[in-house]
């Protein structure tokens, strides 16, 4: 085995010497040698071109695919973060609003308003346990918004001025004309039972009249609008612009009708 290994080494050495001699022989003809190499390279360039093109395209596609995945992951991360911040902001806003409403003494927070009875009634978070009685006036910003229709332990329902079943005796402050305010169930409020010969105008102030003990007199409702309509019974109906924003009710001031001696009332 050792002899065979030595023979291989001698053969390799002889081949290396022969190759060196051939290179030395071709050295004086270096230009011819370089020309042959250039021709071979030019010939091989065409078969290699598709492979080079495919390789470059594949490399660019791989880079684009990686960049696209990174961009998509970044967008998904930003979307999740945005949703989280929006949820936190909504919860914080709701807590702040609830805290602001709860800090008003004598105010009740509106907790429900059904779409089918939007202009008729709202539910508040105070009831008979808090001294809220049926018929008590409900105010927003000092203007009458409605009256308590039903009252139970911890909640009550307030019937709004825009309800078609609620009728409030009122007086036109400037002329002392008496009438009744009622809603049409669709957001409109009208001053009814004003004789046709009465001369009124838009801008006159409307407040509760001293007709019964159900409502204290002098609670402002709003002002008359210029719009009016004639009725078949010889009266004129005037549209009323309420002082309370009936479409945006968040809290109401409930005036308890119980006397202080009862020992029960809103805090």
Image: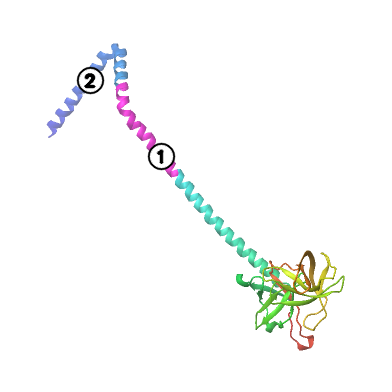
What residue sits 42% from the left and 43% below the top?
A: 65
- Judge the density around disc 2: few (<14), some (14-19), many (≥20) Cα neighbours within 10 Å: few
* Helix, strand or loop at mark 1: helix
Which residue occupies the foreground of this view, 229 or 177? Answer: 229
Q: Is residue 180 above or below residue 94?
A: below
Q: Nearer the viewer, mark 2 or mark 1?
A: 1
Residue at the spot of label 2: 19
| Quarter residue 211 falls in | bottom right
Q: Earlier in the sequence, mark 2 or mark 1?
A: 2
Q: Quadrant of the N terminus?
A: top left
Residue at the spot of label 1: 61
Q: Quadrant of the C terminus?
A: bottom right
Q: Is residue 126 left or right of residue 80?
A: right
Q: Is residue 43 magenta?
A: yes
What residue sits 40% from the left and 41% below the top?
A: 62
Residue 84 on image: x %, y %: 55, 59
Q: Colour scheme used in the picture? A: rainbow
Total tally of numbered discs in the picture: 2
Q: Is residue 239 magenta?
A: no
Which residue occupies the foreground of this view, 4 or 253? Answer: 253
Q: Which residues are magenta?
A: 41-66
Residue at the extreme top of the image, as rendered: 28
């Amino acid at each position: 085995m050792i002899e065979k290994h030595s023979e291989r080494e001698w053969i390799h050495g002889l081949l290396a010497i022969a190759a060196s001699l051939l290179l030395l022989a071709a050295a004086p003809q270096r230009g011819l040698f370089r020309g042959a190499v250039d021709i071979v390279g030019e010939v091989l360039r065409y078969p290699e071109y598709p492979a080079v093109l495919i390789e470059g395209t594949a490399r660019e596609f791989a880079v684009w695919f990686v960049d696209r995945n990174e961009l998509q992951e970044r967008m998904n991360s930003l979307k999740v973060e945005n949703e989280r911040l929006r949820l936190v902001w909504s919860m914080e806003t709701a807590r702040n609003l609830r805290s602001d409403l709860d800090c008003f003494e004598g105010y009740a927070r509106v907790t429900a308003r059904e779409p089918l009875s939007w202009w008729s009634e709202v539910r508040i978070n105070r009831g008979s346990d808090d001294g809220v009685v049926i018929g008590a006036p409900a105010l927003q910003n000092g203007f009458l918004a409605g009256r308590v229709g039903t009252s139970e332990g911890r909640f009550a329902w307030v019937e709004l001025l825009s309800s078609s079943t609620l009728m409030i005796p009122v007086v036109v402050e400037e002329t002392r004309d008496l009438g009744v305010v009622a809603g049409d169930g669709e957001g409109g409020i009208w001053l009814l039972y004003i004789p046709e010969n009465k001369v009124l105008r838009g801008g006159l102030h409307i407040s509760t009249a001293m007709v019964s003990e159900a409502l204290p007199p002098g609670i402002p409702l709003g002002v008359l609008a210029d719009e009016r309509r004639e009725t078949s019974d010889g009266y004129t109906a005037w549209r009323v612009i309420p002082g309370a924003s009936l479409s945006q009710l968040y809290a109401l001031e409930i005036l308890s009708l119980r006397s202080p001696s009862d020992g029960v009332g809103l805090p």
